[in-house]
Image (cartoon, rainbow, N blue to C red):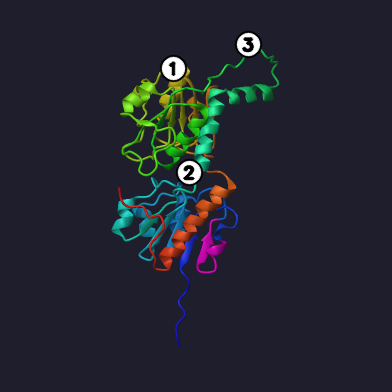
Amino acid sequence: MTETLPPPSVLVTRRLAPGVLERLTPFCAVTLHDDDLPMARPELLSAVAGRTAVITTLDDVVDAEFLDAAGPSLRLVANHAVGAHNVDLAACAARGVTVTNTPGVLTESTADMAWALLLAATRRLGEGERLLRSGRPWAWAPNFLLGMELSGTPLGILGMGRIGQAVARRAAAFNMPVCYHNRTRPSGDTPQGDPRWLPLDELLDRSQVLVVTCPLNAATRHLLDAERLARLPEGAVVVSMTAGVVDEEALAAALDSGALFAAAVDNFEHEPEVPAALLAQERAVLAPHLGSATVRTRQAMGGLAVDNVLAVLAGSDPLTPIGTR
């Protein structure tokens, strides 16, 4: 008589978009942390024991302690994110654990969000809405809440990956000349508008508007500190889509001094905490990490994480593996 093997055991550390897990449950024994909040560390370490695969989010730190708790059965960490700064890639590689992410599927929604934040910051929409909701008296006037016009304004993009290129494509509609800095020049089609590569300091010198989309890693953490922010033209606008690249305290100080016209931040270094110095800035537009927050994108991200799990557990190559840096 043939022995029936138990199905692979998969831990999902966060509630995912509707319908995402339906393709996984017929083939795996799925344990879902059915909550929008991350698992507490002790709970996570206990829950990961003996799993074959784990679908993680950026709040789940995958390090030696995590891998020890999981044990030798763990084959895959499928990170539900485009980045993987929460994962010790070298430690995973040393133990033969594959790591995947969800690139590509969130490009357009995140670029849309960058432009939403840019428009809100330059046209002072947050200030205007707060004024109306406060019930304070107001009246239209020629100098009332004057913003910055984008047409023809130089746009700099720090990080010309998929999202940076999508941001650049949208700039054509505003007739904005685009420059960028990236470790390497983009492969494939040139982004619309033929943006020009510049060294970082020269990019900062020229960018009346700067959008930050580069990934967070050891080389980019606090890359835009007080000294580099000071290189931006007077009255510039900074839009940050990646936590940790912009020094948030330095950004708040630049707003406070009037060196920057405005700033917008979608992703914070110590989420869910937001620096009090930024919260106090009227010219700061702050969003609670909404870059990929559309139904279609979150379903696509979850679906890609599930596809990676199914592929690896079937003995196939992962769809979107991440190598060690």
Q: Amino acid at mark 2?
A: Thr
Q: Residue at x 69, y 15 (%)?
A: 138
Amino acid type assigned to the residue bearing label 1 in the image: Ala
* Residue under the image location 55 percent in, 19 percent down: 147
Residue 130 point in image, percent of width and height: 63, 24
Q: Does the segment drawn in magenta span residue 31? A: yes
Asked if 20 appears above or below 190 in the picture, the reply is: below
Residue beneath label 2, please?
Answer: 107
Specify the quadrant of the image occupied by residue 200: top left
Which of the two residues, 125 or 111, is positioned nearer the viewer here?
111
The image position of residue 59, as x and y in percent, is 46, 46
Q: Indicate the secondary structure of the residue bearing disc 3.
A: loop
Instruction: Name which residue type carries label 3.
Output: Pro
Relative to residue 93, is residue 191 drawn left or right? right
Q: Earlier in the sequence, mark 2 or mark 3?
A: 2
The CA span between labels 1 and 2 is 31 Å
Q: Residue at x 52, y 52 (%)?
A: 300
Q: Is residue 287 magenta?
A: no
Residue 277 visible in the current orientation: yes
Kindly report which numbered mark, 1 or 3, lies closer to the viewer in this rendering. 3
Q: Can residue 52 be seen at all in this image of the molecule?
A: no
Compared to residue 124, the image places residue 87 above or below, namely below
Residue closest to the eye, 256 or 170: 170
The percent coordinates of residue 298 (x first, y second) are: 54, 49
Chain part drawn in magenta: 22-33
Residue underneath mark 1 = 259
Give residue 260's position: percent from left, percent from top: 45, 20
In this rendering, position of residue 18 left or right of residue 50: right
Quarter occupied by the N terminus: bottom left
